[in-house]
């Protein structure tokens, strides 16, 4: 009876070691400090809103007014001819140093930051103020979309629908039109 027990023990020991090794490998695959959360309770509307904010941010302005004092260094190539003057390239349409444009971008970014912070009523007001202050802005389509999103997400469905319908009417070829149509369908439920 003892030899059979020993054989069984020697056969089971490697199997348990393999199982423990597999568990350690699975633990290493997870990021340190990772927390697994159940998201079933999150509403589809909330997920849609978060997706739309991400899309709006991707179409937002690329100007950061804090970069105005940035210095660029240029290195030469050994043996290349150098000039005594510093070249200052000009980009047609570059408004990075225009104080009025910087103020316009700051107003838009403020509205976006309020939305990111979860203060949707204030974000809606800031987008509405932006649209009144800068009616001919190149950021107007994004502000209209942001206003519709803010109003809709804060429970003001009528204002949200009006802003999104205005966005589609004014900008029928804008890349965010399909998202605006999805939002309209969701707000009409």
Image (cartoon, rainbow, N blue to C red):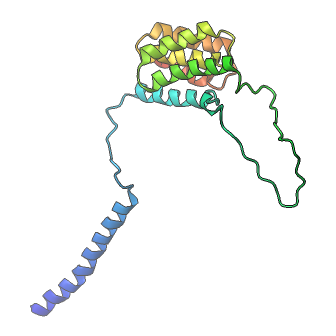
Q: Nearer the viewer, residue 76 or 51?
A: 76
Classify residue 91 as left or right of residue 36.
right
Q: Position of residue 52 (x, y in %)?
A: 52, 27
Classify residue 97 as left or right of residue 56.
right
Q: Position of residue 96 (x, y in %)?
A: 70, 27
Q: Nearer the viewer, residue 153 or 116?
A: 116
Q: Is residue 137 above or below residue 71?
A: above
Classify residue 22 as left or right of residue 159.
left
Quadrant placement of the C terminus: top left
Q: Is residue 104 visible?
A: yes
Quadrant placement of the N terminus: bottom left
At 51% from the left and 19% from the top, the residue drawn is 111
At 33% from the left and 68% from the top, the residue drawn is 22
The residue sitting at the left extreme is 1
Q: Position of residue 98 (x, y in %)?
A: 71, 21
The residue sitting at the front extreme is 84
Q: Position of residue 62 (x, y in %)?
A: 64, 31
The residue sitting at the bottom extreme is 3
At 57% from the left and 26% from the top, the residue drawn is 56
Q: Nearer the viewer, residue 11 or 31?
A: 31
Classify residue 138 as left or right of residue 77.
left
In the rendered picture of this protein, how many numbered marks are placed on residues? 0
Q: Is residue 189 visible?
A: no
Q: Is residue 82 above or below residue 15?
A: above
Q: Quadrant of residue 143?
A: top right
Q: Quadrant of residue 106?
A: top right
């Amino acid at each position: 009876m003892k030899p059979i027990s020993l054989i069984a023990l020697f056969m089971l020991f490697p199997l348990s070691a393999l199982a423990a090794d597999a568990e350690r490998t699975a633990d290493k695959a997870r990021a340190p400090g990772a927390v697994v959360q159940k998201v079933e309770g999150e509403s589809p509307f909330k997920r849609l809103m978060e997706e739309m904010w991400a899309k709006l941010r991707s179409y937002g302005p690329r100007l950061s007014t804090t970069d105005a004092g940035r210095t660029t260094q240029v290195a030469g190539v050994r043996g290349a001819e150098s000039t005594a003057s510093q070249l200052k390239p000009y980009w047609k349409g570059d408004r990075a140093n225009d104080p009025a444009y910087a103020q316009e971008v700051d107003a838009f970014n403020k509205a976006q930051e309020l939305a990111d912070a979860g203060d949707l009523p204030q974000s809606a007001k800031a987008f509405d103020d932006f649209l009144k202050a800068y009616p001919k802005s190149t950021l107007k389509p994004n502000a209209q979309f942001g206003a519709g999103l803010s109003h809709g997400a804060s429970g003001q469905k009528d204002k949200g629908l009006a802003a999104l319908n205005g966005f589609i009417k004014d900008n029928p070829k804008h890349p965010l039109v399909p998202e605006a149509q999805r939002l309209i369908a969701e707000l009409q439920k």
